[in-house]
């Protein structure tokens, strides 16, 4: 399979684009999408750009019953000089393939799908918003489509990429959020699917998320499944703690999602000479450091919100207030630099951005 | 909502029914299905029997991204005098609602959906096969359909019930199978979704299942997520061990699926005066009992295969051969009695069967 130009079926009717000011997250989609099919006999085949349109599946499709699926989340940004930039997109397709492996799904040709994505973005370039904090969210996903109720990997799949212009993930912009440590529910266990970006990991968190929201928290912080002791991640972000000048983040252990923002933050901190370690870190330890006055900053990292300062942590009835609910210095510098690189406002010494042209 | 007669749109073309002899599992579906919709504003609404037809969803539907879904599996059996029996169907709808709760999904009215299912079965009655070992497999499932990429419970759902005439689950009929104890992968952890019948639990097992099949085993036996020490369940069955005259099965602990066959087996054994205990049981203990010559029978229980005798267990390179690979006495009696009750061949002292008429 070496076709690098996809077939394009243009939408006969184009939607009215929303104003940048009214952009929320994940409700508005562009006019077109990218689709590809897989069968064991043919491999991945028939890449095409089609109008954004419903997906039609047999009611017995594996996705509906056994949930074989993987997805990605990435963004395209518009620069001041009207170029369109992607941020480390090859990492997303690498991770998509890692997810596929865990889910017994066929790998895609990473470079090829990235090429098709660029073609989709060219078709949809007018949809990339330009106001500060906005971007075009890109959601590639693969679903198992074979009509078969046996407990076995599907022999047929569909890859779809949809696009959604988005505003800031947090409606009030970047400001410290309150997080509750979840003690009852589990997101993922070692040997499970936590390191893969797959649907079942997310619905499993809704009960905890709802409970936390009712209590006034934005997100939950997940602990490890076994001992409910070690920090894993926060909602759909990885988490970092600045303690006495050193930055600590939980090491990748098979149940944490290996975030691309996480990786980038680690690389940036290293290049700035700020010590950063990936290791097991217990929630008890974090509270102890705070008692000792050493906990300086806490933040989450993820494509949706980029960098989210955390101002408050609740655990077993104890509350911890971080840096007076102010955005920390390193947190702010990471946010400014990362969003600066992503939008072409700051030079990109790491060669992370990829222009779509 | 109190409508008890569903709207019926008949298929304009009826499929040719397969011969009982060629029935496999889960590839052939009947002419009609049951559908119901949910929105936060209306609740569950518009129950209808439609032709078996594709489901059409927005590409941003929550099911494709965050996997909010729950399903059930049950069977309708044809008796020798041509009646159609369900086996404890109310238990399946209770469990469906328990799954919905874990997945932040709205409950259904159990009695009402059972009533609709019966109407669907009346429409499809000719599809219930009659040969020994055959039945009509019933697959109710609920999927989240709202087009929204935010991490929150969907506000819209669809319930669908499809029907599939099935032969024996194991192609060679009831005979002892070989099972491998899985040491690397995890099915479910405490606080996770293991006690719910939800898609994400199943795709998570395919890698282990494939590896076991390559090594010549039918299924894997799952250990607990935390210590990889305690027996949980087998493939899509619960598991029982007969040890020195007593029957032991892992207690429900939040990560094991509470099987309806499991419950029925426990109740039958009690009524027969055979001691049965639900408790934590380690795999090491099972191997020790075998060394001591006390391990008499091992079997799995589940709707698909009803009772599956287990003839061989592999764990850490050690192999354990159970009852000379013969079906044990209690295993056989459970199989005969349960399938006898389900098909109306044996009187049903427990009032478990429900006639569809
Ligand atoms: C569970 C989870 N953790 C962490 C992340 C952050 O990963 P990334 O930085 O690649 O967006 C995400 C989201 O993408 C996620 O879904
Ligand atoms: C994971 C799992 N365990 C056990 C069972 C057995 O449950 P039941 O006896 O209700 O069919 C099933 C299947 O239904 C299952 O999917």
Image (cartoon, coloured by chain):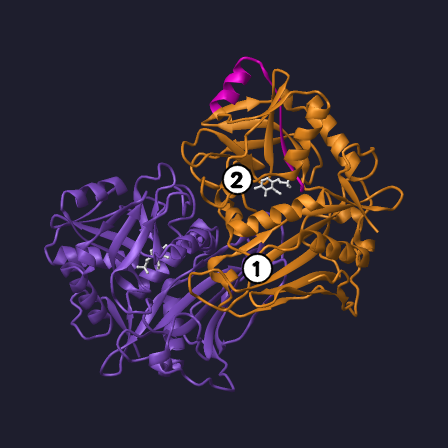
Chain colours: A orange, B purple
Q: Height in image: A194 above or below B66? A: above
Left or right: A348, with B71 as reference point: right
Residue A182 spot, x, y in % from top left: 48, 35
Outermost residue on the right side: it is: A81
Would you name the residue on which mark 1 appears? A143
**A252 falls in the magenta region:** no
Near mark 1 (Cα within 10 A), the count class, few <14, some 14-19 or many ≥20, is: many
Residue B236: name its quadrant: bottom left
Image location of residue A98, percent across then percent down: 57, 47
CB of mark 1 within 8 Å of CB of mark 2? no
Closer to us: B231 or A12 = B231
Q: Residue furthest top?
A: A292
In the rendered view, tell whether residue B123 sits above or below residue A240.
below
Q: Under tag 1, what secondary structure?
A: strand
Q: In which quarter of the image is ligand 2?
A: bottom left
- For residue A35, what is the image quadrant? bottom right
Chain to which mark 2 belongs? A
Q: What range of the chain is rendered magenta?
A: A284-304
Badge 2 density bin: few <14, some 14–19, many ≥20, Cα 10 Å: few
In 3D space, how far apart are the residues under numbered discs 1 and 2 (Cα atoms)? 33 Å
Tell me residue B261's x, y (percent). Answer: 27, 60
Please state, as top left, top right, bottom left or bottom right, where the N terminus of chain A lies in the image: bottom right
Residue drawn at (62%, 39%) of the image: A259
Q: Which mark is residue A214?
A: 2
Q: Per the image, is A291 magenta?
A: yes
């Amino acid at each position: 399979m070496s076709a690098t130009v996809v077939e394009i079926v243009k939408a006969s009717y184009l939607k009215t684009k929303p104003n940048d000011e009214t952009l929320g997250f994940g409700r508005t989609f562009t006019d077109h999408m990218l689709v590809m099919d897989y069968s064991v006999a043919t491999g991945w085949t028939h890449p095409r750009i089609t109008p954004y349109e419903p997906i039609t599946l047999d009611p017995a499709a594996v996705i509906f019953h056994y949930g074989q699926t993987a997805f990605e989340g990435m963004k395209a940004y518009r620069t001041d000089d009207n170029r369109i930039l992607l941020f480390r997109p090859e990492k997303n397709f690498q991770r998509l393939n890692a997810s596929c492996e865990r889910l017994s799904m066929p790998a895609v040709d990473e470079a090829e799908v990235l090429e098709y994505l660029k073609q989709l973005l060219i078709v949809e370039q007018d949809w990339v918003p330009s106001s500060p904090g906005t971007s075009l969210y890109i959601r590639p996903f693969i679903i198992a489509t074979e009509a078969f109720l046996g407990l076995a990997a599907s022999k047929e799949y569909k890859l779809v990429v949809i696009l959604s212009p988005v505003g800031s993930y947090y409606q009030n912009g970047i400001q410290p959020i309150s997080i509750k440590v979840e003690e009852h529910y589990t997101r993922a266990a070692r040997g499970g699917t936590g390191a893969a970006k797959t649907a079942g990991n997310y619905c499993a968190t809704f009960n905890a998320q709802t409970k936390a929201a009712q209590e006034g928290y934005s997100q939950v912080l997940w602990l490890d499944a076994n001992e409910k002791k070690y920090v894993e991640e926060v909602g759909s972000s990885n988490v970092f703690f600045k303690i006495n000048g050193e930055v600590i983040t939980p090491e990748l252990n098979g149940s944490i999602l290996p975030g691309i923002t996480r990786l980038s933050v680690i690389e940036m901190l290293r290049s700035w000479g700020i010590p950063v370690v990936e290791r097991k870190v217990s929630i008890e330890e974090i509270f102890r450091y705070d008692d000792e006055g050493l906990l300086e900053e806490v933040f989450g990292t993820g494509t949706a919100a980029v960098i989210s300062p955390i101002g408050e942590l609740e655990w077993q009835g104890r509350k911890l207030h971080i840096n007076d609910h102010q955005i920390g210095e390193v947190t702010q510098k990471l946010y400014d630099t990362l969003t600066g690189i992503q939008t072409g406002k700051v030079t990109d010494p790491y060669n992370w951005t990829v222009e779509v042209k």
